[in-house]
Image: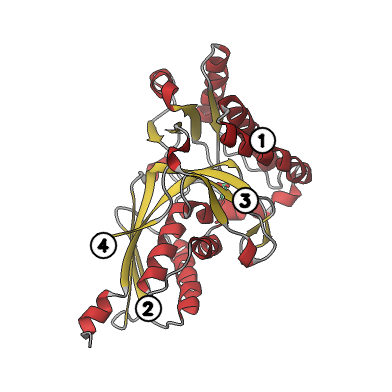
Amino acid sequence: MRKESELRLKMKATAIAPANIALIKYWGKKDDQLRLPLNPSVSMNLSACLTTTTVEFATGHRHDQVEMIGEEISEKEIARVKDHLNWIRKLGKSRLSAKVVTKNSFPKSSGIASSASGFAALTVAATAALGLRLPERKLSIMARIGSGSACRSIPDGFVEWKEGNTTGSSFAYSLYPPDWWDICDLLLIVSPGGKKVSSTAGMAEAWTSPFFEARLENIKDRIKKVKKALKQKNFILLGETTEEEAVNLHAVMMTQKPPLFYWNEGTMEIILAVCEWRNQGLPVYFTIDAGPNVHLITEGKNEKEVRGRIRSLKNVKDAIVNKPAKGAVLAENHLF
Ligand code: DP6
């Protein structure tokens, strides 16, 4: 018979998950609670933007505790983690409280949406800690309920999130492994601190933009183009479609009510520089999420040249170099 201490040890697990950059973006839900999206999306996992999370369920914990190493965590964020633990406890038929400790490899000042890596790592660690052995699809579904984009951080490499109409049919899967294509994502930091309006709040008003319906219509064509570009390793098609998609998303954001202006002077400086570099023959494109920082997409062979040129930009405070990465995995070393 196993000792009590051994049983308790089994109730603890740690996972590492990457953030991801959406080439085709998720913006708008048809079910807020289940986070069912209004369109499919396509992304790439980011090798240098990782969240590590340890979850321990134990009779000794009287209530859920959530801690983030090196960062403040708001009451609202803690409540969202607890809600997610409730979904996982329901699945695992457990009533035990949890201790959650988490840390990001990227600085808070980067303003990266850590919800994707955060909820992917939480899902994998918490389900494993409860002894659930879930297949990738189910992990992706559970992560999606925590934060939509988190479902794309479960599978490896280049990923598609199938829109679906029910919770069981809306999940992400790997299109290609990380080593399929040597793509580089240079995340340029122009503004420290978190974003003013969260993605969750921002996308709730998507329908107020007169352009949103048109976006949902023409996104189908862009999905096809991005998947074709990935299949054929056609970088120009990938870059052009990714950039068009980002501008289309921000046109919707800026025309929502109230309008969302995520760009600042630094964002604009980068956009104009990228267009200029391209005119000079350098294949590099940009994409932007719900914030002012800019992701530059280029092929590995042009990474050095792009990094050199970034030095001339006066608003860029930091650059994080990402390659395509694996999805969420369990790890041996716990954070506590
Ligand atoms: C602009 O996944 O953060 O980054 O499901 O409400 O948690 P919630 O939203 P979230 O939205 C991400 C929005 C985006 C585009 C994308 O990553 O697809």
Question: From the viewer's perspective, is 204 left or right of 99?
Answer: right
Name the secondary structure under disc 2: strand
Q: Quadrant of the C terminus?
A: bottom left
Residue located 53% across and 28% down the image: 265
Question: From the viewer's perspective, is 135 left or right of 56?
Answer: right
| Numbered label attached to residue 334 | 4
Name the secondary structure under disc 4: loop
The local crowd at label 3, few if under 14, some if 14 to 19, many if 20 or more residues have their Cα within 10 Å, is some
Q: Earlier in the sequence, mark 1 or mark 4?
A: 1
Q: Quadrant of the N terminus?
A: bottom left
| Numbered label attached to residue 197 | none
The local crowd at label 2, few if under 14, some if 14 to 19, many if 20 or more residues have their Cα within 10 Å, is many
Q: Earlier in the sequence, mark 3 or mark 2?
A: 2
Amino acid at dot 3: Gly
Q: Nearer the viewer, mark 2 or mark 4?
A: 4
Q: Nearer the viewer, mark 3 or mark 4?
A: 4
Residue 312 drawn above or below residue 2 = above
| Numbered label attached to residue 97 | 2
31 or 317: nearer the viewer = 31
Amino acid at dot 1: Lys
Residue located 54% across and 13% down the image: 281
* Contact check, label 1 and label 2, Cβ < 8 Å: no
